Amino acid sequence: MMRIGIFDPYLNDQGGGEKYMITLAQCLSKDNVVTVFWNNAEDLENVAKRFSLDISKIRLQNNIFSQNYPLLKRLLESARYDRIIILSDGSIPFVFSRKLLVHFQQPFPQIKISLKTQFKKMRVDHFFCNSFFTKFFIDKEFGINSQVIYPPVDSVVKKNKKQNVILHVGRFRARNIDSGDYKKQGVMIGVFKKMVERGLKGWKLILAVGLQDEDKPKFEKLKENAKDYPIEFLINLNKADLHKAYSTSKIYWHASGYGENLDENPELAEHFGISTVEAMGAGVVPVVINAGGQKEIVENGEDGYLWDSLEDLINKTNSLVEDNKLWEKISEKAIQKSRKFSGDRFCKEIKNIIEQ
C-alpha cells in the first residue's frame, strides 16, 4: 500500500480533466492511501456528484501547491508520499516524493521552457497524456516521450427509442464577439438552420451545455440566434438526464477547432472527445470535425464520420438522415468502438504506471 498525493489545479472547473483525475484517485484509493491536495471540500464533492464517482476512501488535505503555501513546508510534506500525480497547467512542480508523475490534458504551444523547468523535468518519473494529439505537442514542447492513457468513458445503455435528434454535448465558454464560443455551438446552430432552410423536416438539434454564470449573457445571444427553429437547449444536466439525451438521439455533432489555425493554437481543438465516445456507446452516430483527438476515436465511414468543411458536415449528416439502414449499421459499429475506452481499461493502465 502506497501513499499517493494528487493535485488538479482546475478542480473547481468540473470538466473532463477533473473527471480524469478524480477517477484516477478513485481507482487508486481501493488499494492505496490517496490524498487530494485542495482547500475546498465542496469542489471535490461537486466533481464526484457530477460524474458519479466514489470519493469515500479519498482524503482531502490543504493544497500544498498553493502560491501561499511555503516552499520548504511543501517540500517536507511531499517527502511523505510514495507517488505524487499532478495535472499540469504547463508548469512542473518541485517535490520530494519518491516518484513524480505529470499528466497533460492539452497542448501549451505558447509556453517557454526555462532552465528551471528543464531542471524540474529531470525529477519527473513519468509523463502521460490523454491523447496522441496532446502527446504530439507536449513531446515537442517539453522534449519528452510521454505515454498516452485515454480517459475513462461511461458506458451509456442504449435502451430508449431513438428519435430524430442531432445532439451536441459540451460546456459553453464564451470567447469574444468575433470568435464566438470555444465549442463552436454557434457554428452548429448556423449549419442546422441552413439544413432546415434547404428542406430538412422532422429533425431537432439539441445542445446539452454546461453553463457558468459569467457566460450567461453571451449564451442568451446564442439562444436568440436559434429562435424559431427546432433547436433545444438543455442546461447543466445531471448524469441520468445526460444519458437519457444520448440514448434517444441518433446523430452526434462536434465542431471544436473549426475555423482555427490549429498549428498555432492546438489547444482550441478537442484534445480527446469524451462526449463523442459517450454518444457512440449509446449508439449515436458521430459526425465530428476531422481535427484534434476526434481523429483517434472515429474511423471515417466505419463507426462514424469525420468532416472537413461545413458542406461536408451537411452532406454526411444527410446521408444518415436519408438512409436508416446505413445509420443502423454505423450505430452498431459505434457501440463496439466505444468499448475500447472503458473505465476498467483506464484503471488498469493507471495502476501499471503507478507500480513502475
Image (spheres, rainbow, N blue to C red):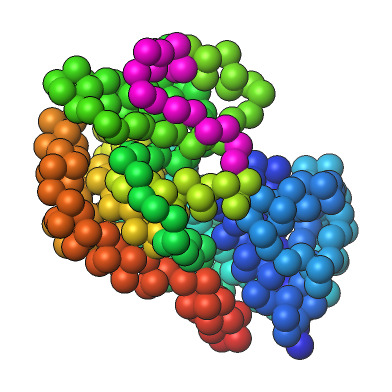
Q: Residue at x 68, y 63 (%)?
A: 53
Q: Is residue 71 visible?
A: no
Write down the quadrant of residue 140 in the picture.
Answer: bottom left
80 relative position to 351: left or right:
right
- Highlighted range, magenta: 222-237
Q: Is residue 17 above or below residue 313?
A: below
Measuring 62% from the left and 61% from the top, which residue is drawn there?
A: 21
Residues 184 and 239: in front is: 239
68 over 200 or under it: above or below: below
Exactly how many numbered labels are in the figure?
0
Tell me: residue 183, above or below residue 250: above
- Residue 130 vs residue 219, the one in the foreground: 219
In the displayed structure image, the side of residue 69 where residue 210 appears, left or right? left
The one of 354 and 29 positioned closer to us in this rendering:
29
> What residue is shown at x 69% (from left), y 70% (from top)?
26
Residue 39, position as x, y percentages in the image: 84, 48
Q: Tell me residue 71's x, y (percent).
A: 81, 53
Q: Residue 59: x, y in percent?
A: 84, 66
Queried whether the magenta region covers residue 226, the answer comes back as yes
When asked about the image quadrant of residue 179, the answer is top left
In this picture, residue 193 sits left or right of residue 308:
right
Left or right: 45, with 26 as reference point: right
Counting from the top left corner in percent of width and height, residue 356 is at 56, 86
Residue 232 included in the magenta stretch of the image: yes
Given residues 261 and 205, the one toward you in this image is 205
Residue 245 in view, yes or no: yes
- Quarter of the image with the N terminus is bottom right
At x 78%, y 53%, the residue is: 45
